[in-house]
Image: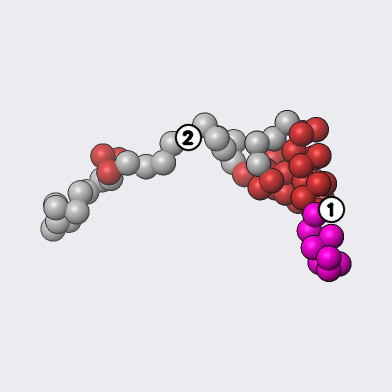
Amino acid sequence: MSTTVLVKKDTIKLLEKAKRILKLRSYDEVIRVAVEKLLNIPDDMFGIDRGRISPFSEGDRLFSEDESED
């Protein structure tokens, strides 16, 4: 077994342990939390409504694509 494979397995074990301890759902969330803490990024840099707003819908547009702005 190569060293690279061993390193990847160790990384997966670390990510799995962190995911379980932090009660997160994915490795992506674990990495995000780790990087935010490492770089000391405050939560307010992501917006006060993060996770509470929905994406825009077609009905939210001022003009539909069928209408012209004349």
Residue 55, by quadrant, is top left
Q: Is residue 67 magenta?
A: no
* Residue at x 20%, y 49% (from the top left corner): 64
> Counting residues from the N terminus, which is met first, the one under dot 1 or under dot 2?
1
Residue 57 visible, this angle: yes
Name the residue that disc number 2 marks: 53
* Residue 39 place in picture, x, y as percent: 79, 52
* Residue 61 place in picture, x, y as percent: 28, 45
Name the residue that disc number 1 marks: 10
Q: Amino acid at mark 1?
A: Asp
Q: Looking at the picture, does residue 64 appear above or below residue 22?
A: below
Q: Amino acid at mark 2?
A: Ile
Q: Looking at the picture, does residue 10 appear above or below residue 59?
A: below
Q: Quick one: label 1, few (<14), some, or many (20+) residues within 10 Å?
A: few
Residue 48, by quadrant, is top right
Q: Is residue 8 magenta?
A: yes
Q: Is residue 44 left or right of residue 59?
A: right
- Contact, mark 1 vs mark 2 (Cβ under 8 Å): no
Q: Quick one: label 2, few (<14), some, or many (20+) residues within 10 Å?
A: few
Residue 41 visible, this angle: no
Observer-nearest of 31 and 12:
12
Judged from the image, the secondary structure of the residue bearing numbered disc 1 is helix
Q: Which residues are magenta?
A: 1-10
Q: Looking at the picture, does residue 5 appear above or below residue 39?
A: below
* Residue 47 place in picture, x, y as percent: 59, 41
Q: Is residue 57 left or right of residue 70?
A: right
